[in-house]
Amino acid sequence: MRVHVADHPLITHKLTVLRDERTPSPVFRQLTEELLTLLAYEATRNVRVEEIEIQTPVTTTTGVRISEPRPLVVPILRAGLGMLDGMVKLLPTAEIGFLGMARDEETLQPYTYAERLPEDLSDRQCFVLDPMLATGGSLGAAIDFLFARGAQDVTAICILAAPEGVAKIQEQVGDRDVTLVLGALDEGLNEKGYIVPGLGDAGDRLYGTV
Ligand code: URA
């Protein structure tokens, strides 16, 4: 598994405003979108392309276009939805699938409560959007789900991650082709499972406490 932690002053600046508890939802949403566009640039570094020949006004030349089948972007509901617009701004031809993951409060295991994805993901490059990689339960389940449908490789984009979550995903994916692209790697988790220093509950801060 490859782990890429973003290292760019613009990303750190936007993350700092996002972490600040005084930042209201409209600004939080706007910054999440902007951050995603910056992280998407890193995350798409290995997007598959093919060579094509085109005619400029001056001559013919070769360039590239994104290969078929088109990449699939999968936000994990609910908070991953806040990352979608920023991602597709950079990858407008991607297809979009949806996964709703929650945790069974008795078994503490993640389960899928909603799913709208192509049945066959053979040869697909998949990009999963999940803002907070905390324990890694739901992201790990989402990655398993995509490989079980035949995905070729999976890149997960997270705004923040805890080392515990990264270790869990690493152990779970083994030698499958997975990349994590992180806005920052934080210190750890507190006793309630929140990332520290973190930014609180990403879904609540995006959408209010509903
Ligand atoms: N989910 C969140 O929204 N925030 C955390 O800190 C951890 C998980």
Image: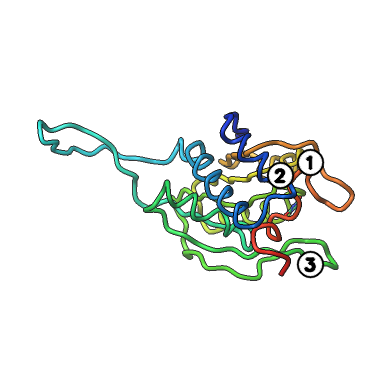
Residue 18 shows which numbered tag?
none
Q: CA distance from mark 2 to mark 3?
A: 28 Å
Measured as percent of width and height from the top left, residue 174 is found at: 66, 41
Residue 19 shows which numbered tag?
2
Measured as percent of width and height from the top left, residue 54 is found at: 17, 39
Residue drawn at point x = 48 percent, y = 65 percent: 119
Residue drawn at point x = 39 percent, y = 52 percent: 92
Is 87 displayed left or right of 175 in the figure?
Answer: left
Label 1 neighbour load within 10 Å: few <14, some 14-19, many 20+: some
Label 3 neighbour load within 10 Å: few <14, some 14-19, many 20+: few
Residue occupied by mark 1: 197
Measured as percent of width and height from the top left, residue 182 is found at: 62, 39
> Which of the marked residues, 2 or 3, is nearer the chain's N terminus?
2
- Of discs 3 and 1, which sits in the foreground? 1
- Report the amino acid beneath label 3: Asp
Q: Is label 3 in a helix, a strand or a loop? A: loop
Q: Are marks 2 and 1 in contact (CB under 8 Å)?
A: yes
Q: Relative to 163, does residue 32 appear above or below in the rendering? A: below
Measured as percent of width and height from the top left, residue 21 is found at: 75, 49
Is 17 displayed left or right of 44 in the figure?
Answer: right
Residue occupied by mark 3: 104
Q: CA distance from mark 2 to mark 1?
A: 8 Å
Residue drawn at point x = 49 percent, y = 47 percent: 152
Q: Relative to 174, does residue 129 appear above or below in the rendering? A: below
> The N terminus lies in which quarter of the figure?
top right
